[in-house]
Amino acid sequence: MGILEVKGVNKRFGGLKALNDVNLDIQEGSVHAIIGPNGAGKSTLLNCFVGRLEPDTGSVMFDGQSLLGIQPYRINQIGVSRVFQTPEIFADLKLLENVMIPAFARRDGSFKVNGWKSVGEEREIRDEAMTMLAELGMEAKADHVAGQLSRGDKRRLELAMCLVQKPKLLLLDEPTAGMARADTNNTIDLLKQIAKRGITMVVIEHDMHVVFSLADRISVLAQGTVIVEDVPGNIKGNPKVQEAYLGGAHL
């Protein structure tokens, strides 16, 4: 039994069947990539994991608990964090403040100050946030305004914001989208470091260099259906993948 189990998930939007009997078994501590052409249903599937969409039928279980019918903030609190295609940061705040906000939210469910404990708690949160920035090599920029960062550093900051919440499962939707190759390679190295922490990762990504650098297993979606799931070495030469994903061209 995996840490994330998806069974028989279907999702329809009017006459369009976005997901068709999707089954996945994501093993704890693994990096599992989901690839496929545009419109294959990848983001729809991810949204079913985090409470943004409810499947028409099927089940989504995380660590033995159903994720269906749970508010997104509760899904986050039980150990699921998501990285979006465009980094979700507080652009007008400093890096340290960006990381402190989710650290507060992890404890209280929201960013709020309690007069009875605010001084001591804020000091703890500040230290925790600074430690996380240091682990990701950003402590020297702690007082910089987040909106002034490069695309790659914005992604690194967003990952710090996720990791300070101590997730068991990290969902990454196109984590290197819009990056130059140098930033992409730096992000790959960072995600490899995160994987060594034992955090399970599900990665949606179009860049095959990223996918084959990171993934332990790959599921291929086409027209809402998982057509293949295998280790990366077997995915490259699979004729079903070549036909559905690249029109017969080799990966």
Image: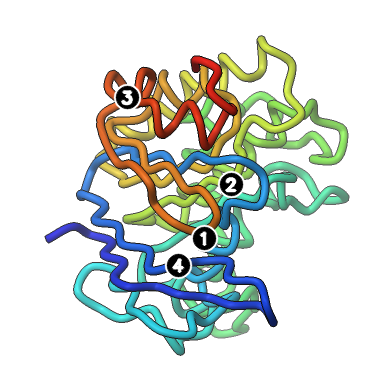
Kind of residue indicated by mark 3: Pro
Q: Earlier in the sequence, mark 3 or mark 4?
A: 4
Q: Which residue is mark 1?
A: 46
Kind of residue indicated by mark 4: Asn
Kind of residue indicated by mark 2: Asp
Dots 4 and 2: beta carbons under 8 Å?
A: no
Callout 4 crowding tier (Cα within 10 Å): few <14, some 14–19, many ≥20: some
Mark 2 falls on what kind of element? strand
- Does residue 141 sit above or below 1 in this rendering? above
Dots 1 and 2: beta carbons under 8 Å?
A: yes
Q: CA distance from mark 3 to mark 1?
A: 21 Å
Dots 3 and 1: beta carbons under 8 Å?
A: no
Question: Which label number is shown at residue 112?
Answer: none
Q: Earlier in the sequence, mark 3 or mark 1?
A: 1
Q: Earlier in the sequence, mark 1 or mark 4?
A: 4
**Position of residue 75 measured from the top left corner of the image (x, y, whole percent):** 44, 74
Q: Which residue is mark 4?
A: 20
Mark 4 falls on what kind of element? strand
Of tags 3 and 4, which is closer to the observer?
A: 4
Of tags 3 and 2, which is closer to the observer?
A: 3
